[in-house]
Image: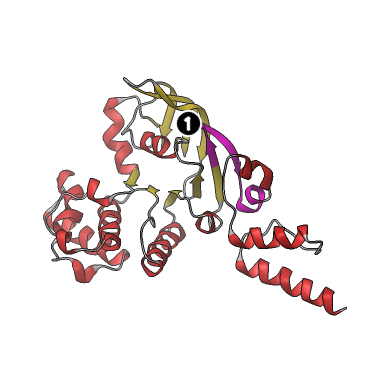
Amino acid sequence: MIILEDVYYKYEPEGIEALRGVSLQIKEGEHLALIGPNGCGKTTLIRHLNALLISTSGKVTIGGFDTNDAKHQAEIRLLMGMVFQNPDNQIVGMTVEEDVAFGPENLRLPTMEIKKRVAEALGRVGITELACRNIENLSGGEKRLVALAGVLAMRPRYIALDEPTAFLDPAAAKRVLNIIDKLHSEGVGIIHITHNMAEAALTQRIVVMNEGRVYLDGNPREIFGKVGMLKQIGMQLPQITELLINLKESGFPVRTDIVSMEDALEQIRFLADKIKD
């Protein structure tokens, strides 16, 4: 379990307080979306989860290990993988194979175990054919998959992803989301920062942040049912939800706590039957 207890963090020397008393528990294997306006503290929060940042006050515990305890930081980083928004910030190898092998090599694993992990990680994200490709010749989407494969080669229990589909075309974004869903189905805990409300709607739980604090916390149906609170902080709603809200405001008897296309179609069929009657 991941536990944050009254966590504050201030960037120095600017004195900017990015987290203001965040308390949160994330269960192992949970798929959580972290959303909120720009500058609300989302990226700062996930950087606390593998001890890249250490809280100014409060406590962060990952799998029973306190991130403030330097002697446990290596163990924490084995538990918690991190995929940054810009994959160039974490890719270090010249080729795909070299980059994915970097983490296991630093663990001083036997050569055959490293090769096994690299092949397994490349296969899990579907880029086995890129193994010998030079990193410089990859697209942005391919680099995201290489960064994810490098994390998977370390076999973490949790992975935090900072806007993993940002700036990708729809096909590449769908590929990344399918891989995330597959990892979750295999028991890997996912913390997913996104500005895409349709992506957030597909998760088990949504945490909304605002001004460095947890603003809302619940399942997608609960969160997107709080239209006024979301709009108050400038958040958009999934297009499906917006459509049903507009229908309801026009006097049609539809539910608005809908987050999936299937549920929306059911509501529209219900409405069509009502109109026929």
Where 149 sits versus 161, above or below? below
Indicate yes or no whether the magenta region holds residue 148: no
Horizontal relation, residue 103 to residue 30: left or right:
left
Q: Residue furthest front?
A: 250
Residue at x 27% of width, y 63% of height: 142
Q: Nearer the viewer, residue 210 or 6?
A: 210
Give how far across and how far down residue 152 sits, in percent: 30, 54
Give how far across and how far down residue 203 sits, in percent: 53, 55
Density class for disc 1 (Cα within 10 Å; few <14, some 14-19, many ≥20) is: many
Does the image show residue 226? no
On-image quarter of the C terminus: bottom right
Q: Nearer the viewer, residue 184 or 108?
A: 184
Q: Amino acid at mark 1?
A: Leu
Q: Dot 1 corresponds to which residue? A: 4
Give how far across and how far down residue 185 sits, in percent: 46, 60
Where 16 sits versus 160, above or below? above
Indicate yes or no whether the magenta region holds residue 209: yes
Where 211 sits versus 269, above or below? above
Range covered by the magenta-colored residues: 208-224
Residue at x 59% of width, y 61% of height: 239
Residue at x 33% of width, y 33% of height: 51
Q: How is the image coloured?
A: secondary structure
